[in-house]
Amino acid sequence: MPTMARHLADVLDPSNTRSRVLADRGYDSGVNRNVLDEHHLEGGIARRTQAGKEPGVRLKARNRAISRTRARVEHVFAGLHQLGGKTVRTLTLARNTLAITLKCVRYNLKRLVWLAAHDLA
């Protein structure tokens, strides 16, 4: 099981009002499905196919629907990664928080300029 998949229960936020958790195939395990059930959350984890078998039509459609939504979020993380990601070169928590916040502001301004240039803002 991938490292991040072991910590799904640790990152679930009870104050989040969404009832569905979307995740890629790396989180597809019985343990994670049980964690979602315990937290009364609907599973939106893309499913893996069994080794040596072709995925069925329903499985492909399910994974495609999950991927469409996740792709919108993943583009934001990719944009932040282009700006240096979460790497910071300061020693205090306050300065680290400021550095990451400024990267997010920079990303949002860059996105706003792009949207304005394409008459979408």
Image (cartoon, helix red, strand yellow):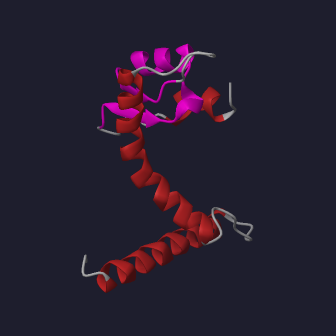
Q: Is residue 49 left or right of residue 61?
A: right
Q: In the rendered view of the protein, which quadrant contains the C terminus?
A: bottom left
**Residue found at x 47% / y 34%:** 12
Q: Quadrant of residue 93?
A: bottom right
**Residue found at x 69% / y 32%:** 3
Q: Quadrant of residue 81?
A: bottom right
Residue 21 horizontal/vertical position (percent)? 40, 33
The count of marks equals: 0
- Residue 76 visible? The answer is yes
Foreground residue, 120 or 10? Answer: 120
- Residue 15 visible? The answer is no
- In the image, residue 109 sits, relative to residue 60, either above or below, namely below
Residue 26 horizontal/vertical position (percent)? 59, 31
Please say whether residue 31 is one of the residues in the magenta stretch.
yes
**Residue found at x 40% / y 16%:** 37
Residue 45 horizontal/vertical position (percent)? 45, 29
Please say whether residue 84 is one of the residues in the magenta stretch.
no
Foreground residue, 121 or 20? Answer: 121
Magenta stretch, residue numbers:
18-47
- In the image, residue 76 sits, relative to residue 71, either above or below, namely below
- In the image, residue 107 sits, relative to residue 67, either above or below, namely below
- In the image, residue 91 sits, relative to residue 44, either above or below, namely below
Q: Is residue 3 left or right of residue 67?
A: right
Q: Quadrant of residue 70?
A: top left
Residue 61 horizontal/vertical position (percent)? 35, 30
